[in-house]
Every structure is written in structure tokens, then in C-alpha cells.
Amino acid sequence: MKNMNRKKWTGLIVAGVVAFSLTSYSALASRRHPKRSIDWQSCGEEFPAAECAMVGVPLDYDKPRGRQIDIALARIPATDPHRKIGTLFINPGGPGGSGVDMVLFGWGEYLKEVTGGQFDVVGFDPRGIGASAPIRCFDSQEESDAFFVGYPLFPYKEEQKWPYFVRTNEYAEICLDRDMDITHHMSTADVARDLDLLRQAVGDRQLTYLGFSYGSHIGNTYANLFPGNIRALVIDGVINPELWTPGLQIVADRTAAQKVVNEFSRLCDEAGPDNCAATGPMGAQAIGDALADALREEPFIFPDGSVYAYDTFIADTLSAMYRPEMWGGPDGAAAFVGALADAVLYNDTRAAEVAKEVQLSLKRRFEASHPTRDIYDNGLDAFFGNTCGDIQFPFRYQGIYAMGEFAAQGSKFGPAWWWRSSTCARWPTADDRHVGPWKTRTSNPVLIVGNYFDPATDYAGAVASSKLLENSRLLSYAGWGHCAFSRSECVGNYVVQYLLDGSLPKEGTVCPANPNPFLPNMLRSMDRGTPRETLPAIGRPLLPGSFR
């Protein structure tokens, strides 16, 4: 897949996607009773195989004939019309991820190929995200990036907590003060309702869907709101809706990443210092803990003058746990940890230079895995628009603080997951959110995929959902990383077969873990030409870190 920088994307917006929007958006938006059909047009010369469109849906489903907003779509058409099954809708997670970008940057072609061209592969930007009536809290990316400058990514010292809470509340107030109607209509329930209208617009009697990470919550919500409309629905990297909706996801998040870090350390030690730079006589776990403790006490200054603090180290570690494909090798996460540990713990100047080189290499790799077509990435705004609309978080500092202490008791990653929720203290929930019940029986079985070691959506979430969706089937992957479909050939084969004909793996099926990602033969199998490295990442962590 060809990776592109922001400047090239600026040209694309003018020449392609936005050019399409200028001709079609106003026409769709002006319809009081939008026609549920789709006028597919070219996405621009950069994407000759793809088609784009806008479809009108109600802003408020309590007023279905009232104001309409537009949902952005991109598709890779089926190549075998005689054997065409229908449309495969996909979502990359977040919340805040763009399904349009997912299709345009590789997933559309990949899914078309693995399913034999029997589906139109369609990605959509959920309401408020990307090009679908986007929520925008700032006038420019620079203004957005500057807002949290001077504040930690999350508070890890006592004196940081109150100022962080105040600042996140100011962020919420800025978003709400812009008086955007979409701000109050971004619940997952409304996304599911939009998806059902899109299903009807493409002419499918029932839905075929593949959702990752937060996209699993879209799938879960759809299954409960429209249980009779399921043809084939896959959720991979699954959120437990009974934790998510009442604001208790931290129960899972506070320990999930640490379990993956433990596996990272075990595999690193197993591979040995010749293959994993993060190990040594102390063992990888002890080295990582010592490095974290040292950075918590005092940030490290690289030879170029850049500062590397504890919160960034936690964010970088969390990001790395999403993608085992980036653990090994001379430019992998273990190489960075090993060199940084030598620099911080033993004052090794050459190691500091190596760590900076690896850090920059990892940054380029992570940026390549998160391509976007928009100059203003509203992923953060959209994350809060959806999350705060869906979930009732504590609205007083005391409640946020108490849950922060609970999160910290789970692992050092708990606070990184929790404190971002303080933005929702002043953000009202959406009137039309769905809070349950979550137990239902669908017209056809749902396929649920869970990783044993997933840093963002722990395996227990998949197990819980498999019990809530009565006739579902749980497919397990005994490996590491966030989501499994493109990571495990075994999982991928089962998922594709289910999408094609509805056949399910045998009950209790567990796909084996890939070989140790630090071993040379595994590194060769994960070169830059494989889908694992070239497909856009899914369910990216919210904290930016230095790799992003």
C-alpha cells in the first residue's frame, strides 16, 4: 500500500473527496425526506478503485422527518457480480475512527481479495466523525494540538490531578460552546440506527458487518436494536457493553495492558538478549519497571534536548502493545526500551542516541499505520462526543479522583486509561443512548473474536458478549495484540468463511498464538510487504505518546 503525507492529502481533498462533497453534500443535506438510495461517485484519482457517497439520515430519530445530516461512505465494489452476496460494512473502532479511511487506505481491497470479490466492501464515518457531520472543537489542527501543551498526557503525580481535571473540563466547555447540534446526537444507538438505514439503502435484506474494537460496541448495539436484521455480524476486540455503558470499562482496562506487557517480557526473555534488546540479567520485566520508576522520578533529556517523561513512556508502551509486529527487530519497541534503559539507568550517551533513532523510526511506522485524508483530525473531538454521549461518568472531581485511585491499583496503565474520562464530567449524555438490556437472540448467530492478551479490549469482554448474545459463537486467539482478524491466519480463515456462508467454528475453538515475535524467523515473516504491517491499524489508543 502506498503511504501518503499530509501535503499530498491536502491536494486530494481539493481534487477528490471534498470536490465530491461540494457537488453532492448540499443536495443531500437540503432534502427534508432524504431518499434512501446512494449516488456513488469517484473518490478522486488517488483512489481509482473506490467510490464515495453521502447519504442523508435524521439528526434526531425522535424527529425522523426533521433535519438531516450526511453520512460519508466509501466502497470497493464487488468484482464477481454473478456470485455477489451483498455489502460488507466495516468499522475500525475508536470511537473516532474513520471507516472511509479504512476502506480507502487498504482494508477495502484486502477484504475484497480475501472474500473473493463477493461483497461490496463499504466503510462509513459514524456521525460526528471524519466527513459525517463532523464535530470540531477547534478551528485548526494547530489550535487543537496546542490546547494540552504543558499538561501531562494523564496525571501521575498528586499535584497534577486537579489542574488536569480543570483543563479537560475546559476542553469540554469549548466543544459544547460551539453549539454544534451533532454534539448531542452522537450516541452509539444513533450510529446503529444510521447503519440500519445504510443497510436498506444498499438494498440488503439483512446486515453483514465486521467491527473492530469500539466497532464491536456498534455491532453489539445493532444486534440488540435490530436482532432480526442480522445476516452475518463479526465483532473482534470486544467491549463488554455491561461495563462500557455505565462507565465501568476501567474495571477491564486497568489490568488488560499489564497482562500484555507481562507476555512481552516473558517472550523477550525467552528469545534472549541476542534477539530482544529489552532483556538482560535482571529480566525484561524488571528492566521495564526500573525504567518506568526512574522516569516517574525525573524526565530524561535526550542529547538533542527533547524531553521524555513517564507519561509518554506509558503511552508509548500502551501503543506498542497493540501491535506485536512492531516489538522485535532493530527498529522495534524492544530495541527502544533496551537502549532507553541503558541511557536512563546507566547514563550511556551512545545508547541515548540509539534510542532517539529507534524512537523516530517507530514514529514513522506508527504514522504510516494511521493515515488520514483530512488536515484536521477530529478523532479526539469525536471520541469524547461519542463516549460522553454514551456513558454517564462521575460529574464531580471527587468521583473522578476515586476512580483514578482504583485504576492505579490495577496497574501503571490504569490511570492512563481512566483520567481521560474526566472530560465527560461536564458533557451531558445523549437522550437517545441505549443502556440495555444487552441480552438478545439474533436472527443468525454472531461471531465473536477475542484475544487472550489484548491491551485495550480484554478477553473477558468477548466472553461476556458471547453469553449475552444467546446464539453467538466465541472464537478465541491465544496470542497478543489488539484484535485478531488480520493478525492470525487461523482467525482470518474462520471469519472469512463465516462472512461468506454463515458457517461457524466448532464451539470452544482456540486459534494458536503466532510464534514468538522476537525470533528472527518471525521477523522475516512480518516484513513490510505483509498485510499486518501495511494495513491501517485499528482501535488506536487515545494517548498520543511520542510514536504518534
Image (cartoon, rainbow, N blue to C red):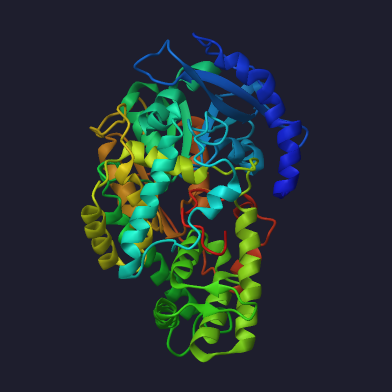
Q: Position of residue 471 (x, y in %)?
A: 30, 34
Q: Nearer the viewer, residue 434 or 392?
A: 392
Q: Residue at x 48, y 37 (%)?
A: 210
Q: Position of residue 513 (x, y in %)?
A: 46, 61
Is residue 508 visible to the viewer in this orientation of the structure?
no
Q: Nearer the viewer, residue 30 or 146?
A: 146
Which corner quadrant of the image does residue 160 belong to? bottom left
Q: Nearer the viewer, residue 465 or 4?
A: 4
Q: Position of residue 290 (x, y in %)?
A: 41, 83
Q: Position of residue 234 (x, y in %)?
A: 44, 38
The vertical placement of 285 against 198, above or below, is: below
Which corner quadrant of the image does residue 226 belong to? top left
Is residue 531 visible to the viewer in this orientation of the structure?
yes
Q: Residue at x 63, y 72 (%)?
A: 358
Quadrant assignment for the C terminus: bottom right
The vertical placement of 110 against 254, above or below, is: above
Q: Residue at x 49, y 31 (%)?
A: 501
Number of on-image labels: 0
The vertical placement of 111 against 119, above or below, is: below
In the displayed structure image, the side of residue 56 where residue 63 appears, left or right: left
Q: Nearer the viewer, residue 363 or 522?
A: 363
In the displayed structure image, the side of residue 467 where residue 49 appears, left or right: right
